[in-house]
Amino acid sequence: MGVNPFYKAFCRCYQKIMYVAVFFLPWNQNKGTLSGAGSIKELPQFLKDKGFGSILVVTDNFLFEHGMADPIAQKCEELGMKSVIFHGVVPNPTIQNIEDGLQMYKDNECDCIVALGGGSSMDCAKGIAARVACPKKSVPQMKGLIKILLSGRGKKMPPLVAIPTTSGTGSEATVAAVISNPEKKEKYPINDPYLIPRYVVMDPELTIGLPKPVTSTTGVDALTHAVEGYIGSENTKQTKKDSIEAVQLIHKYLKKAYDNGADLEARNQMQQAAFLAGRAFTRSYVGYVHAIAHSLGGFYGVPHGLANAVILPYVLDAYGKSAYKKLAQLADCIDIKGESDEEKAKAFIQWIRDLNASMDIPEKIKAKDGSQLIKEEDLPIMIDHAYSEANPLYPCPQVWSKEDLEKIYRIIM
């Protein structure tokens, strides 16, 4: 069963309106970047010079126990600044996670939030900042588009600093915070330009110890951002440039970073790729890969990068000729050959499959013991979640029906 043509027309009109509207949003939230090996140690002095005195560091327990936040805490103490560490972030951060971090922020009269980690730490930090700015709005009330902007309280947002310790989510450059609600088994984004971190620290030394599975899946997560952003219909000149450069960097450096985790150049370039891909898709949006991946995270806690990596080639295949031209352009940028757009597009998709296989990324979504994870009885709700997330917002090459989405779920099962 295809999509109702009137609904398809509605989706495309909605997307055109959004494309025009985003040009009037306050995108200039990012005010600076610290980069290079050891740059994390420069952050406290940088913040002190900006007038901040009490910092909430938001991270997960693994990074906390491994001392990743220590350089910030030690330097703050030397400079006479206060710092407290909220290390309760869980994968796919929850509403309660955010409320717990918010309480620590209030108790310590903080004036700045530093997110240290991957996408989960950044999502949690963004959620805390949003609650500080809009104390009368609950997290679910900020679900969707520009609720902070519309509240008129964007200026009340405490400055966010993002320090990525993986190279994939791109959250350091995006408008999105993705939150999980375990009670309802849902995972949804809060999208607002005021969630773009004000400052970014890209220190490749922080990614040296990443396990291989994290390097691989977060790297393909960045690739998914670049590809989905590029093949959609809401690109700007800058988002195209960022997506192409990100794909080129991932093509050249992801496998190097995977094979040799201590390769500082590869780690540095993958951080840049993740940032560029994040900056691209936060303007041009993502697509059905992400909508499906979010449902898997909400229901089963599947890591977002892993879900994207598994789903990406199947969705690109399903788009067929509607995506050939743009996929062929991406193939051109990494010198993949072909006699036609179709040949180049299919070769590009095969490159993604080969890249996944070379890094032991599975072809299906399974439980840790190898058994089937996706339950038949969960499918209708997951399909509903993915459908309502993607339509009418995401400017994908095609507008899909619930039946189209079900096909992808059944393939990855």
Image (spheres, rainbow, N blue to C red):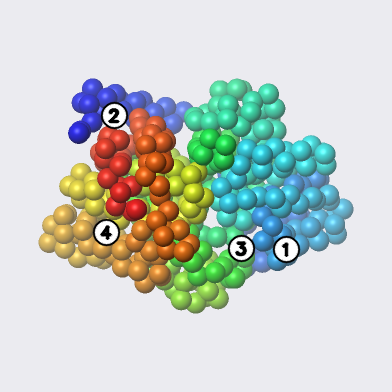
Q: Earlier in the sequence, mark 4 or mark 2?
A: 2
Which residue is located at x 33 percent, y 47 percent?
Answer: 409
Task: Give the Cα separation between the discs numbered 4 and 1.
Answer: 39 Å
Amino acid carrying label 4: it is Ile
Residue 201: x and y in percent read 62, 56
Amino acid carrying label 1: it is Glu
- Find disc 4 in the rendering and name its residue: 349
Amino acid carrying label 2: it is Arg
- Find disc 2 in the rendering and name its residue: 12
Evaluate if marks 4 and 1 touch, with contact meaning CB atoms under 8 Å apart.
no
Q: Nearer the viewer, mark 3 or mark 4?
A: 4
Evaluate if marks 3 and 4 touch, with contact meaning CB atoms under 8 Å apart.
no
Residue 233 in sight: no
- Find disc 3 in the rendering and name its residue: 203
Asked which secondary structure carries label 3, the reply is loop
Q: Earlier in the sequence, mark 1 or mark 2?
A: 2
Evaluate if marks 1 and 2 touch, with contact meaning CB atoms under 8 Å apart.
no
Asked which secondary structure carries label 1, the reply is helix
Q: Earlier in the sequence, mark 3 or mark 1?
A: 1
Q: Residues within 10 Å of mark 4 (few under 14, many from 20)?
A: many
Task: Give the Cα separation between the discs numbered 3 and 1.
Answer: 19 Å
Q: Nearer the viewer, mark 3 or mark 1?
A: 1
Q: Earlier in the sequence, mark 3 or mark 2?
A: 2
Residue 351: x and y in percent read 29, 65
Asked which secondary structure carries label 2, the reply is helix
Task: Give the Cα separation between the discs numbered 4 and 2.
Answer: 26 Å
- Find disc 1 in the rendering and name its residue: 65
Task: Give the Cα separation between the discs numbered 3 and 2.
Answer: 40 Å
Q: Which mark is residue 363?
A: none
Which residue is located at x 40 percent, y 50 percent?
Answer: 374
Which residue is located at x 50 percent, y 43 percent?
Answer: 298
Q: Earlier in the sequence, mark 3 or mark 4?
A: 3
